[in-house]
Image (spheres, rainbow, N blue to C red):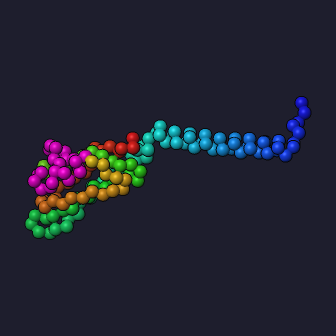
């Protein structure tokens, strides 16, 4: 078997083959990486970024006034249908579009609508402090 003759057109042809193989391998790598992310779900990356609730006293009368902030801590995915433990929270304290009491110790934030990545949602109520924390939620990217 004789080595190929290396005329300028043959050299150019070989260079183009090597470049296309390199491009093809880069494309394959990108495809496999993207497929892996989709398979494992981007929401899995948010599993450690559960939503949080922070209450701050903003009024000091009787009864006191509190501002409640619900924060989506995930930098990539919207979060929907956020439910909070809310004890005997009286529905009359807050517009139900902001916080709807579904039953004892179960309230839904923002009518269950999405909260964008890293977005905060807040509402105020005037009453003795009622402890609240997230119980269930769903990331939309899962």
Residue 48 shows up from this direction: no
Q: Is 57 situated above or below 11?
A: below
Residue at the image position 69 percent from the left and 41 percent from the top: 21
Residue 61: horizontal and vertical position, in percent? 11, 69
Side (left or right) of 114 relative to 5? left
Residue 70 seen in this snapshot: yes
Residue at 61%, 40% (x, y): give it: 28
Query: Which residue occupies the foreground of this view, 48 or 35?
Result: 35
Outermost residue to the right = 2
Q: Residue at 63% across / 44% down in the picture?
A: 26
- Image height of 93 relative to 21, above or below: below
Residue 25, quarter of the rendered image: top right
Residue 110 lies in the magenta stretch: yes
Image position of 46 with respect to 121: above or below = above
Looking at the image, which residue is at 44% across and 41% down? 41
Left or right, 104 with respect to 114, comes to: left
Residue 90 on image: x %, y %: 11, 52
Q: Looking at the rendering, in which quadrant would you find the C terminus? A: top left
Q: Which residues are magenta?
A: 90-112
**Residue 50 appears left or right of 42:** left
Looking at the image, which residue sits at the far front? Answer: 9
Residue 114 left/right relative to 128 = right
Residue 43 percent across, percent down from the top left: 40, 44
Residue 122 image-quadrant placement: bottom left
Q: Where residue 66 appears, x then y in whole percent? A: 18, 62
Q: Residue furthest top?
A: 1
């Amino acid at each position: 078997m004789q080595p190929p003759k290396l005329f300028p057109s043959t050299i150019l042809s070989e260079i183009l083959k090597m470049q296309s193989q390199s491009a093809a391998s880069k494309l394959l790598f990108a495809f496999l990486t993207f497929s892996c992310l989709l398979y494992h779900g981007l929401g899995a990356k948010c599993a450690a970024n559960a939503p949080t609730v922070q209450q701050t006293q903003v009024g000091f009368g009787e009864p006191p006034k509190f501002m409640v902030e619900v924060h989506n801590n995930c930098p990539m995915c919207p979060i929907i249908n956020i439910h909070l433990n809310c004890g005997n929270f009286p529905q009359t304290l807050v517009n139900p579009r902001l916080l709807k009491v579904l039953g004892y110790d179960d309230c839904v934030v923002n009518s269950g609508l999405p909260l964008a990545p890293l977005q905060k949602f807040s509402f105020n109520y005037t009453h003795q402090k009622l402890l609240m924390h997230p119980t269930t939620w769903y990331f939309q990217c899962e």
